[in-house]
Amino acid sequence: MTRSMHQDAAETVLRRTMVLLLLLLMFSSSSFPSVTAECPDNCSCEEELTVFCHGQGLDRIPVRIPPATKVLALSYNKIRDIEPKSFTHLTELETLYLINNNISEVKNGAFSNLSKLQFLRLSGNKIENIEIGVFNNLTSLNELYLDDNQIHKLDLEMFKGLTKLNKLSLGNNMISSIPPGIFDSYNVVESFTA
Ligand SMILES: *[C@@H]1O[C@H](CO)[C@@H](O)[C@H](O)[C@H]1NC(C)=O
Ligand SMILES: *[C@@H]1O[C@H](CO)[C@@H](O)[C@H](O)[C@H]1NC(C)=O
Ligand SMILES: *[C@@H]1O[C@H](CO)[C@@H](O)[C@H](O)[C@H]1NC(C)=O
Ligand SMILES: *[C@@H]1O[C@H](CO)[C@@H](O)[C@H](O)[C@H]1NC(C)=O
């Protein structure tokens, strides 16, 4: 009889402790929801402003990139496509690295909301085709690297809208002719080889 009462009391204490622990767990996870949840898989994040996903074997752009991200490093992966929606929420983005991936086409809308982007590095991909208007909204872009790709043709409209551009790197492509006047409004064109 006394033993059973003892057990009951012990069980009650245990149950109360468990409930308390559960409450503590719930409380602590809800008060720090973004510490780990906001960083994409296989990436590391610093204060949610810099997101490093270099050389992770990624075949697509990660989801859940924090909207406050300023630097996004996605080089040395196997990314093939830039979906039009991939970066649209990254309105604070200033630097985007996509060096040495497997991108063959850059479609319209890929960079449509990146009005603060200053550095865009797309070197070492398989880009053949750049849709007209892709760079239209990149009004802060200072440096654009497209070297070491497979670009055949430059269009007069291709770089329209890049009013702040200072450096354009187009070396090691397959460009056979340059439309007259295409670079008239830019200060510097670097390492250009036809
Ligand atoms: C992250 O890396 C692991 C191991 O390299 C891999 O199995 C997993 O698919 C990767 N995740 C993503 C989202 O690519
Ligand atoms: C690159 O993309 C091509 C198709 O465009 C595919 O055949 C190839 O396997 C990809 N390479 C890598 C390393 O993912
Ligand atoms: C640009 O971002 C805004 C929110 O900042 C969003 O409402 C809009 O849909 C985005 N534009 C595109 C083309 O995705
Ligand atoms: C440029 O941004 C505006 C909204 O800010 C959007 O409606 C438009 O589609 C964008 N243009 C391109 C070419 O992405």
Image (spheres, rainbow, N blue to C red):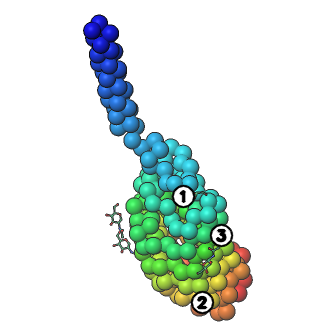
User: In terms of secondary structure, where does tag 2 sit?
Assistant: loop
Under circle 3, the secondary element is loop
Counting residues from the start of the chain, the first of labels 1 and 2 encountered is 1
Expressed as whole percent of the image width and height from the top left, the position of residue 46 reads 54, 45
The mark lying in front, picked from 3 and 2, is: 3
Q: Distance between the residues labelled 3 and 2?
A: 21 Å
> As shown in the figure, which amino acid type bears the numbered disc 1?
Leu
> Which amino acid does the dot numbered 3 rest on?
Asn
Query: What residue would you read off at disc 3?
Result: 100
Which of the two residues, 151 or 28, is positioned nearer the viewer here?
Answer: 28
List the single residue furthest toward the front.
Answer: 1
Q: Nearer the viewer, mark 1 or mark 3?
A: 3
The residue that label 2 is drawn on is: 153
Q: How far apart are marks 1 and 3 (CA)?
A: 14 Å
Name the residue at 68% across, 83% down.
173
Q: Residue 72 — which label? A: 1
Give the side of residue 190 with respect to residue 2, left or right.
right
Look at 61% across and 63% down and name the residue there: 57
Of pointers 3 and 2, the one earlier in the residue sequence: 3
**Mark pair 1, 2: CA separation:** 28 Å
